[in-house]
Image (cartoon, helix red, strand yellow):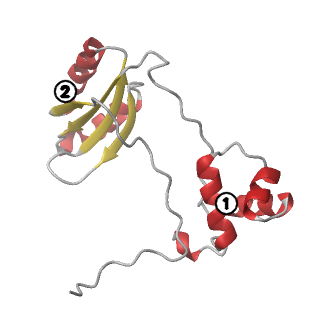
Amino acid sequence: MAIESSPYLDEYGRNLLQELQRDARLSYADLGRRVGLSPSATAERMRRMEEDGIIRSYTIEIDREALGLPILAYIRMTCDGQRYQPFLKFVQGMPEVRECHHVTGGEAFILQVTTASIAELERTIERLLPYGIPTTSIVLSSPITRRAYEVLAKPRMKPTGQL
């Protein structure tokens, strides 16, 4: 369902999403106060947005470095047709792989990987070699880690080529 087609994305719904992105732990009463709804109306709207697939989950963000995982890297993988399905099965069982995206372009996949050391990252890369050619970039810093989605009243329009 397209986000703009839901009847729950009026001004109240968009404001709920903005507040939830700031703090997903707010109670229905606190959320309702912030957006101008009763706790029961807030709970009902959130339930409907969950059913519509607009809200998929409520999560926390954990500091990976505090967990002993200071190395963050992105690995771009080439992967030919024969190795495609075995690769997908293999990466499912790799706890170092935080995200895996199938992409267009020269590589087939981009993996986000966290490890405790460069040596552990090297072992992870070696384990990927049977499935394709990995190209690795180690993250030095992250000026923007995650942005909240801007929930607009109207969908953004593409430029029409006017001067």
Mark yes or no: residue 1 visible: no
- Identify the element where label 1 is drawn: helix
Whether residue 78 sits left or right of residue 92 in the image: it is left
Task: Name the quadrant containing residue 157.
Answer: bottom left
Residue 113 coordinates in the image, percent (x, y): 34, 29
Which label number is shown at residue 153? Answer: none
Mark yes or no: residue 68 visible: yes
Q: Classify 109 as above or below 9.
A: above
Rendered residue at 85%/62% (across/down): 38
Residue 23 coordinates in the image, percent (x, y): 64, 45
Rendered residue at 44%/15% (across/down): 68
Task: Give the spatial CA distance, label 2 vs label 1.
Answer: 47 Å
Rendered residue at 62%/58% (across/down): 17
**Residue at the disc numbered 2:** 130
Instruction: Give the mark, 2 or 1, whose residue is nearer the N terminus.
Output: 1
Whether residue 147 sits left or right of residue 131 in the image: it is right
Q: Classify 155 as above or below 135.
A: below
Residue 102 coordinates in the image, percent (x, y): 30, 48
Rendered residue at 59%/36% (across/down): 60
Q: Which amino acid does label 1 sit on?
A: Leu
**Residue at the disc numbered 1:** 16
Q: Please tell me how many numbered marks the rendered image carries.
A: 2
Q: Judge by depth and name the residue closer to the eye, 101 or 13.
A: 13
Q: Which amino acid does label 2 sit on?
A: Pro
Residue 93 coordinates in the image, percent (x, y): 41, 27
Q: Judge by depth and name the residue closer to the eye, 59 or 99.
A: 59
Marks 2/1 in contact by CB < 8 Å: the verdict is no
Circle 2 packing at 10 Å, graded few (<14), some (14-19), many (20+), is: few
Task: Name the quadrant containing residue 36.
Answer: bottom right
